[in-house]
Image: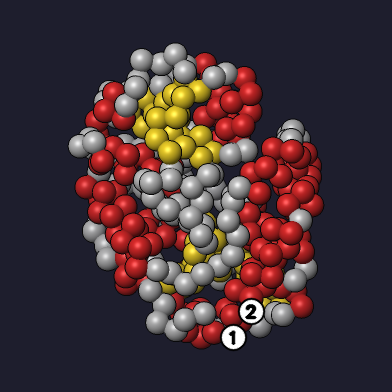
């Protein structure tokens, strides 16, 4: 049986595993580059989020297993996708933060009312902004969220097209080298922001052995990243260069050194965060229905 594993650079663990050849020794695997699939609709920050990555778990030519950031599983559940969590990473609190320019008159999150805030909408950045706003009594409708990619967000932030930006490394490093920024909200203390991995319930129940092999391979590969961060960073740089871009090996190495690796069972703290995010997304009109995230807990531990 061929197992289809989706990967892309934003999930560092799966991207490195794709290049290491570890999983191939355990199962018959077909790697599916998410960037090669037909693009999902561009998320509109004023409307409901699409299901994004999870749709391909239930589509011919898609994949059986995927890893993403914090928010996509929530949108999957809200769109009726029968997914289950497989595991989570440790907190990734150093991955990014909400920043303004050093000379901005925005001095607190409350000052964001009516302002343009750049985010990669539908990612963990949406959750960070929602949590930050909720903590000071603001809601989604109190700001003007602007959907940006990492590159576009950096350019918009530099030019002043947005007033604040949820920047992520290594892209944030380039901005910090150009201009002085001030942190408005750190990820640490706001939410844990782990990587997470999920699959369809049907796949998990019918293929527990193969699922365990994937988890074991991720753990082995992640340990290699910890031991060899510069070599791991080279995979990302090579990929960017092959696509006509430019990337700093030092910046990528620094980013990988500051990220936790390893896959762990879901925790009560994580589920509580997911439920809070789901409730805020629904209250902000970004989900088609309210959900209970514990519906996605896999009874069989891996």
* Residue drawn where x is 64% and y is 44% of the image: 255
Residue 44's place in the image compared with 214, above or below, is: above
Q: Residue 219: x, y in percent?
A: 64, 70
Q: Report the residue marked by disc 2.
A: 213
Type of colouring: secondary structure
Q: Which mark is residue 209?
A: 1
Label tally: 2
For residue 285, side relative to residue 234 (left or right)? left
Q: CA distance from mark 1 to mark 2?
A: 6 Å
On residue 227, the disc is: none
- In this view, the residue in front, 183 or 195, is 183
Q: Secondary structure at mark 1?
A: helix
Q: Are marks 1 and 2 in contact (CB under 8 Å)?
A: yes
| Residue 287 seen from this side | no
Judged left or right of residue 193, residue 33 is right
Q: Quadrant of residue 119?
A: top left
Q: Position of residue 270 (x, y in %)?
A: 38, 62
Label 1 neighbourhood size at 10 Å, few (<14), some (14-19), many (20+)?
few
Task: Please tell me whether residue 291 is drawn above or below residue 245 in the rendered image.
Answer: below
- Horizontal and vertical percent position of residue 93: 48, 47
Q: Nearer the viewer, residue 48 or 209?
A: 209
For this rendering, which residue is in front, 159 or 88?
88
* Quadrant of the frame with the N terminus: bottom right
- Mark 2 Cα within 10 Å, few/some/many (few <14, many 20+)? some
Residue at image coords 47%, 18%: 102
**Position in image of residue 39 (x %, y %):** 54, 48
Q: Is residue 286 visible?
A: yes
Seen from the viewer's position, the closer of residues 82 and 133 is 133
Q: Is residue 118 above or below residue 39?
A: above
The residue positioned 43% from the left and 53% from the top of the image is: 192
Q: Secondary structure at mark 2?
A: helix
């Amino acid at each position: 049986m061929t197992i289809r594993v989706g990967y892309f650079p934003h999930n560092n663990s799966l991207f490195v595993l794709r290049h290491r050849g570890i999983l191939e020794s355990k199962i018959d695997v077909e790697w599916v580059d998410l960037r090669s699939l037909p693009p999902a609709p561009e998320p509109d920050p004023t409307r409901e989020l699409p299901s994004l990555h999870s749709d391909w778990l239930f589509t011919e030519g898609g994949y059986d297993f995927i890893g993403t950031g914090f928010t996509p599983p929530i949108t999957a559940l809200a769109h009726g996708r029968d997914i289950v969590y497989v595991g989570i990473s440790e907190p990734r609190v150093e991955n990014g933060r909400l920043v303004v320019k050093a000379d901005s008159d925005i001095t607190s999150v409350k000052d964001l009312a009516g302002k343009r805030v750049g985010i990669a909408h539908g990612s963990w950045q949406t959750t960070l902004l929602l949590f930050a706003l909720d903590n000071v009594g603001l809601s989604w409708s109190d700001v003007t969220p602007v959907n940006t990619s990492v590159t576009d967000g950096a350019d918009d932030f530099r030019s002043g097209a947005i007033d604040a930006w949820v920047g992520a490394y290594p892209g944030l490093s380039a901005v910090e080298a150009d201009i002085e920024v001030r942190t408005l909200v750190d990820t640490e203390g706001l939410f844990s922001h782990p990587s997470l991995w999920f699959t369809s319930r049907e796949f998990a129940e019918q293929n527990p052995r193969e699922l365990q092999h994937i988890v074991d391979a991720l753990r082995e590969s992640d340990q290699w990243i910890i031991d060899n961060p510069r070599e791991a960073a080279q995979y990302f740089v090579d990929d960017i260069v092959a696509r006509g871009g430019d990337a700093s090996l030092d910046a990528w190495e620094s980013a990988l050194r500051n990220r936790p690796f390893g896959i762990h069972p879901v925790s009560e703290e994580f589920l509580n965060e997911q439920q809070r995010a789901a409730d805020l997304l629904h209250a902000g009109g970004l989900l088609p229905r309210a959900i209970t995230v514990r519906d996605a807990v896999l009874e069989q531990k891996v």
